[in-house]
Image (spheres, rainbow, N blue to C red):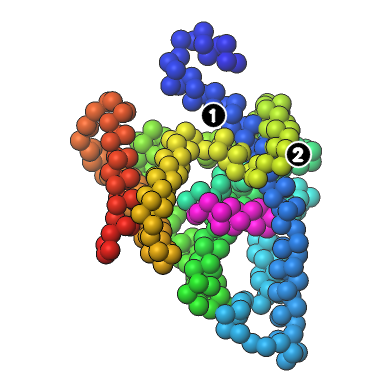
Amino acid sequence: GISDLFKSGMDWENLTHSVWYYQVRPIAVGAMIVGAFHTLWGMRNQLFQGIAKGIKDTTHLRMGKGTYSRLEDDLPILAVIGAVVLFIVPITLIYYYFTKNLLSAVVASIVMTLTGFLFSAVAGYLVGVMGGSNNPISGLTLSSLVIAAVLMVALGVKGTAGVEVVLGVAAVVCTALGIAGDMLQDLKVGQILGGTPRKMQIAEIIGVLFTSLVLVFPMSILHRGTEGGIGGKYLPAPQAGLMSVMSKGIVSGEIAWPLIIFGGVLAFALILLKTPSPTLIAVGMYLPFETTSAIFVGGMIKYVADLIVKKKAYSESEMVQIENRGILLASGLVAGESITGVLLAGLYLLNINLPHISENPFIGLLVFPIVALILIVFPMRKSL
């Protein structure tokens, strides 16, 4: 417990990280489960209406009753549902390979399908609210992992087989959530620019196929060629580590259920208090401090920029241009960070050590004035 950590003489940085990692995050997972279902309940009409409209439009077009609009030309929803059902079969066989139990494999597939479908709606909604870089994939994946693990224990599937099938469910759901966020962003941009949804959806399918065939190779090289592999010192994977710990804990009966239940009760209390989004609060608890603090700083920069724009009394069209430029610059910083992360991983693989500047973490704060300057001054210039 916490008292043992104090007695061990652990420094404050590791102590606070341990408290957050092993106690706050399980609370956040419990809150996220309740918050996710609350978000789904609030979106129930839109979900059902969207599915019903897709089926209705497909039926009318087949019967020649519907009017064709290129901007509303989607892949036939019945074909999409059929493809989903078709792909469930080989995944079920994979789960059966792990468990050697047909009932548990079928149950795992049902959990995978339902949570993947429902949580994809939540992920898409949150991406629309907060942006693609804040898609709480790992938190929603953990929610599906908890549900699958509980059911596997109830069916008597324990040990290594239980952990493998639970992680298998989490892997598929995690992929679905990532694609959901990406697809929602693409379709939103396509709607603004006048793109054809069907063509964008086909392009997304092609992209997923190529990625699944290609991405496994660099991941394998990184895992084999880096000291400690993926999850080690140089290529840490905290979300994957937490999922492994939780799946093993639930299957073995050693999970901290009181913390998860407390998180669920906390989210329920927030719902009763009419909090705008309990899920966002849970996401804030779940994400590490370096991420949430960066989001906070970004919000403060936006607030300062809005004050300056308001004080200078720009016209409405100028304000729109300034905001669009700021969004483009911020998006570029996010993309650049992602590319840099991949390059750093490649340098670790090649055993290339970058120059070490300082052990003082406060030196890193010097980047924030530069970022603020870029995101405030440059959007307000007449031309970039």
* 363, above or below 94, in the image: above
Please indicate whether residue 348 sits to the left or right of residue 71 in the image: left
Q: Which residue is mark 1?
A: 21
Q: CA distance from mark 2 to mark 1?
A: 27 Å
Q: Main secondary structure of the magenta part?
A: helix
State which region is magenta. 116-132
Q: Amino acid at mark 1?
A: Tyr
Place of residue 5 in the rendered image (x, y in percent of width and height, measured from the top left): 53, 14
In the figure, residue 364 lies in which quadrant? top left
Q: Which residue is mark 2?
A: 272
Q: Nearer the viewer, residue 384 or 242?
A: 384
Image quadrant containing the C terminus: bottom left
Which residue corresponds to the image point at 54% horizontal and 29% vertical from the top-left?
Answer: 21
Which residue corresponds to the image point at 50% horizontal and 54% vertical from the top-left?
Answer: 131
- Which element carries disc 2, helix, strand or loop? helix
Q: Nearer the viewer, residue 71 or 219?
A: 71
